[in-house]
Image (spheres, rainbow, N blue to C red):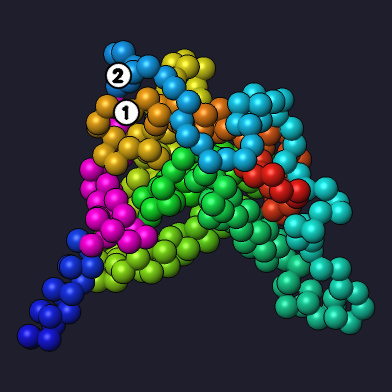
Amino acid sequence: MLSRLGRLRTQTSKLRSLTTNGSAKNLSFFSRYGYASVAPAPAESPPQKDFPSKSPINLDKMFWSKPCSLALPKDSPLRVDEPNYEGIRRFILKLLMFYSKQSMSIRGANVIYKRIISQVDKPAIYDAFNLEKTFKITYSLLVLHMWLVLRRLKEDGKEGVDLGQYVYEIYNHDVELRVSKAGVNLLLAKWMKELERIFYGNVVAYDSALLPEAKPNDLQIKLWRNVFSDDGTTTPEATDLKAAQAMARYVRREVASLSLTDKESIFSGNFSFTPLENKPL
């Protein structure tokens, strides 16, 4: 009994530490967020000024540029193409269901999720929007890019929705690993349920911000609350509002660019989000 209480005390202290330091800083925001609650925009926004972006690129020039397909070119080293086996090897793989629709969808979903992770885990996105790399912010960016992909997959009907389910299952497994690495083991199931609630709340919020009847700054406000704010209730600083405004332009451009990306590139994962750094694809 004493040893069990000791383990419980240790796990509880880990959970407390996640809210104040370490890679999972601000994890406590989970318990304060509603499913899709939307705090009203401030009646009068503070004066806008340039936020100190560390990005080596011109954000305004990039985000206001014309959307274009995000498909990777045929000669891109980032492409992941289906192996073209022949002869007896291909015959055996067919018997093993390697080329079944389900197997190919799972492989495609893995590549798609790698594209999401590549954008979210790179320092460039944190530098571009002047973000601190904490568990809360990383998770918020992960949800945002998951939403972008799932929204695009829905455009291809049931086939896209089915593929999106595979991507979501991979995402869930990855999030569980990330939470475990952050030191949460004893109450893992509870945290995962809370993360799921936040995921769907953010997805609903972003969808509503793109509706024709939405206010022009709805997406900016919801991005500020989900990504930049610790609790979603405090008055945003001018620098955060400016950064959220730039991120809103980035999101709208990615939505349009993903729609211009062909189905084959999307389903195979052979696309790349707009790079936020001066590096060739």
In this figure, which residue is indicated by the disc labeled 2?
42
Residues under numbered marks 1 and 2 in contact, where contact means CB atoms less than 8 Å apart = yes
Q: Residue 78 at what x, y percent from top left? A: 75, 57
Q: Which residue lies most toward the top here?
A: 44
* Residue 106 in view (yes/no): yes
Q: Which residue occupies 46% across, 40% down?
A: 130
Q: Position of residue 272 (x, y in %)?
A: 69, 47
For the view shown, which residue lies furthest in the right direction? 87
Residue 164 appears anywhere in the view: no
Nearer to the camera, 151 or 41 = 41
User: What is the crowding at mark 2: few (fewer than 14 residues within 10 Å), some, or many (at least 20)?
Assistant: few
| Amino acid on which disc 2 is placed | Pro
Which residue is more in the foreground, 65 or 175?
A: 65
Element under disc 2 = loop
The residue that appears at 92% across and 78% down in the rendered structure is 87
Residue that mark 1 sits on: 236
Image location (x, y in percent) of residue 14: 23, 67
x then y, percent, for residue 122 = 56, 53
Picture quarter containing residue 176? bottom left
* Residue 73 position (above or below residue 8): above
Is 33 in the magenta? yes
**Label 1: few (<14), some or many (≥20) within 10 Å?**
many
Q: What kind of element bears circle 1?
A: loop
Task: Please give left or right for residue 175 compared with residue 40 in the image.
Answer: right
- Give the image quarter of residue 20: bottom left
The residue sitting at 38% across, 55% down in the picture is 135
* 27 over 145 or under it: above or below: below
Is 46 rendered above or below residue 199?
above
Give the Cα distance between marks 1 and 2.
Answer: 9 Å
Amino acid carrying label 1: it is Pro
The range drawn in magenta is 17-39
